[in-house]
Amino acid sequence: MNKNQKGLTPIILILIVLAIIAGGILAWQYWWVAKEEVKPSPVVPVGSNDSFIKAKIISVKPTPENVFPWRAEIQLLESQDVKGYVNLTKEKVNQTLSVRSKESMKDFKVGEMITGYLSLEGDEREIFYLLREIKKEIDETANWKTYKNEEIGIEFQYPEFFKTPLKDAFWRDVYSGKSINIYFMEEGFGFYASTPDYKAFKEDPFTGDENIILRCPQPFTYDKKGNVCKILEVAGEKAIFENRLYEDECVIGFLSRVYFNNRSDSIYKGLMFTVFLDDVNKKISFPYDCTNEGAQKAYSEAVRQSKNIIEQKDLSERDKEKLKLFYQILSTFRFLE
């Protein structure tokens, strides 16, 4: 073997080793990495969907993306159907949603009210909410009064035309615990705060429950007595909207209410806000035949009206406005630090 051949031998060996390493890397990328990247595709909405919404801006910021240069978090306050499209946001009312937009949102600020069109978009990679045709909305709550209670650790706003709320704090030896009740009697609204051990009524008020979602296992839940519930969000807390059917000597009626946990340090852990809808109650609040057949007819009508309340349809104009006001007040609730 000449000198030139001896010099080439180490080089050839090095090249062979490098080739083996390179081949191993390519094989690893093909057989291992490729398998790691295979993931089940998320469910993509079937058919066209759209909704006209009213919302409050929670946060807004630009992004480096070219297609969706703006992202925001909004509290969805209203969701209306758009003719010819499926509404996939109606069940999200009073919840906080993350949205994207192709439009500039530099002139929009946190706390402002907006309107626009919101749809669920996506492909095999991801799904997201797309917000478009965004416009500023006049904040109808801007000149409202503020009710603040440091003992409960919460404040909320209410319309100027409401009468001054009546505070009723009471506790008795025959009952346990403590409750504070704030009534707007003439307008049909009430707010209640209770300690966890409070017991006073046959239908006890909400006294706090860490597993609050278990009280409403599905987004919309109905039972055979006409009670109905759905999941909402109030002041960043999960909340339950419920139509509670009550009965007294063959007369029935509804009390619509939202209950949620108190995040402040107050001893009052259970919070509840209620509204009495006059016209829908007139349809069901009547003495019925106290037989099984009479009760069945009465409860059947109660279930139908309960669904109308939860879905906000087929209500009188007065009840629509009252329910709208109810949700507006809920949107102003804030826990005190």
Image: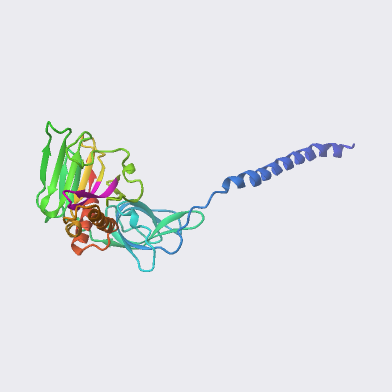
**Residue visible at 78% across and 39% down?**
11
Q: Nearer the viewer, residue 151 or 275?
A: 275
Residue at the limit of the structure toward the top, as seen here = 173
* Residue 49 falls left or right of residue 210: right
* Residue 238 falls left or right of residue 322: right
Q: Nearer the viewer, residue 299 or 104?
A: 299
Residue 54 found in image quarter: bottom left
Q: Is residue 2 above or below residue 44?
A: above
Magenta residues span 239-258
Residue at the limit of the structure toward the bottom, as seen here = 84
Image location (x, y in percent) of residue 83: 35, 68
Q: Is residue 82 magenta?
A: no
Q: How is the image coloured?
A: rainbow
Q: Is residue 337 visible?
A: no
Task: Please tell me whether the stretch drawn in magenta is mainly helix, strand or loop.
Answer: strand
Q: Is residue 256 magenta?
A: yes
Q: Is residue 13 above or below residue 128?
A: above
* Residue 83 falls left or right of residue 295: right
Count of marks, rendered view: 0
Image location (x, y in percent) of residue 15: 76, 41
Q: Is residue 18 visible?
A: yes
Image location (x, y in percent) of residue 106: 34, 57
**Residue visible at 13% across and 47% down?**
183
Image location (x, y in percent) of residue 86: 39, 63
Query: Which quadrant is home to the C terminus?
Result: top left
Q: Nearer the viewer, residue 251 or 211?
A: 251
Query: Which quadrant is home to the N terminus?
Result: top right
Residue 28 found in image quarter: top right
